[in-house]
Amino acid sequence: MLLSGCTSINFSVDNLLAAPKLTAEQSEIHEALIAAVGNNLTLKYPKNGANRSAYVIADIDEEPGDEALVFYEYTGSETNDDGLRVNLLDKDENGKWQSVKEIAGAGTDVDKVIIAKMGADNHTNVLVGYQTLSGEEKALEIYSYFGGSFGRIGTSSYSVLETIDVDSDGANELVTIRRQTNTETGLTTSTASLLTLNKTTDDEGKEVDAVTLTQSIEMCDNVSSYARALAGRVADGRNALYVDAVDAEGMLHTELVYYRYSALQNPMQIRSEKLIPLCTRPYGYYSADIDNDGIIEIPVTRPLTGYESAPPEEQLVLTSWTHYVDFYELQEVYSGYYAVSDGYTFVFPGRWADSVTVKRDPVTNETVFYKYAGDINAEMTELMRIAVVPKTQVEEFTFSGYQVITSAGQLDYLALLPTNKREQLIPTVDEVTNNLYVIES
């Protein structure tokens, strides 16, 4: 790491003003940008993270008013300035946007942009991850805008990049995970590192921020990639980073990075022989905070009742949502069917244990719950079906007896319950409402 002081669509600037999502403030920033650097450029949109606009507007100098970061690359044969650029703009004393400084980026695309308070003084910094041509590892650059000066204060590389107050001291730390492959053995190892910001002095004796690597721990070996990372808490309240890793067979497992006994730990790596087989499951079954209490649930899967002998490609699975608890245990919190493609899980009522199974209706693409009668291919009693439809189509479903259970965005989640309620396994509407969780992607 070098240290020093101090699903995207690219629109051309010529067409940008016609873009429907361009706000009045972005239009002003746009005009100030082309006044400073010209209009032969293409905006670059972050592909991941919370900030997905080419215009990232935030207060990064902790003075009144926001600043703007714009990501772009030059186009046109008249310029030799190849490569991605980041431009900081701020308002002058008259409230007009002005370009402060342009810096060359470290890659070909923007992976993610994080605005975070870090360090002992909780100063705001800009973390930009860049995709590069070299492969999976991405380039990280950390920028600071302080005292009117905008500059790069640190660089590194990563496969996973997140900020989290991992030691619960009130200040965010930067956690990166890096993968390295031994060219002789072919073995891939991964390391999670904790980076912090500290004050130091430059060659001129000026106090500046500097990035320091304080701790590193091992992650599980032979991970082919990392699908995603999610900051949250473990069951005892400690902050933790949950990392869903992909193995050589394309299956997922979850690893944890948290702070314990004044040091980083990854309990899943420490007890990998016990825990990794437990939480290895099909791709797409990501860890999630399904009940929005801040504690992340880790999915554990096994074949649904009736599918135990079915070929793997035909199996539907029961998903147990678990919490990691000391010492080295996964404790089940919920258990039910997770409709991954529809983005919800339905937790089975207690009386359903080993008595209910699931099939997908190939015609309507609905999830249908049945009373299991000993053969998954035999005729079974239908207990409920769940449909996920756009709001524009809801009326035709409710006309047919479906009931809206919940909504998310432009989708409604509906249930159809049999009118004959003599079967005790048929759930009530309240049960369906309380047991259906929409899972954010």
Image (cartoon, rainbow, N blue to C red):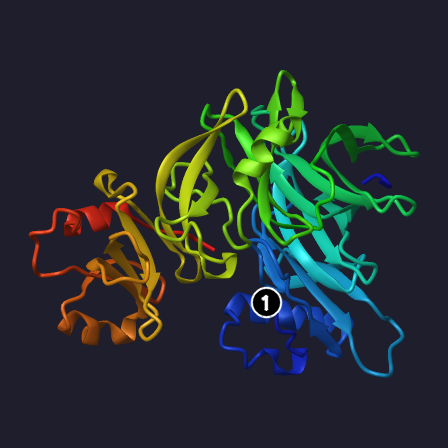
Residue on which disc 1 sits: 7
**Relative depth, front residue between 52 and 363:** 363
Q: Is residue 17 visible?
A: yes
**Relative depth, front residue between 67 and 285:** 285
Judged left or right of residue 24, residue 245 is right
Q: Is residue 149 visible?
A: no
Can you say whether 109 is above or below 156 in the image?
below
Q: How many marks?
A: 1
Decide: few, some or many residues near mark 1? Use Cα within 10 Å; few <14, some 14-19, many ≥20.
few
**Relative depth, front residue between 68 and 167:** 167
**Relative depth, front residue between 427 and 180:** 427
Residue at coordinates 31% horizontally, 56% vertically from top-left?
375
- Quarter of the rendering containing residue 10: bottom right
Name the amino acid, label 1.
Thr
Residue at coordinates 46% horizontally, 61% vertically from top-left?
314
Q: Position of residue 199 (x, y in %)?
A: 77, 29
Judged left or right of residue 364, residue 156 is right
Residue at coordinates 67% horizontally, 79% vertically from top-left?
12
Can you say whether 400 is above or below 237 in the image?
below
Judged left or right of residue 328, residue 225 is right
Q: Position of residue 269 (x, y in %)?
A: 66, 31
Q: Position of residue 427 (x, y in %)?
A: 17, 49
Q: Secondary structure at mark 1?
A: loop
Q: Position of residue 15 (x, y in %)?
A: 62, 82
Residue at coordinates 69% horizontally, 37% vertically from top-left?
220
Image quadrant containing the N terminus: top right
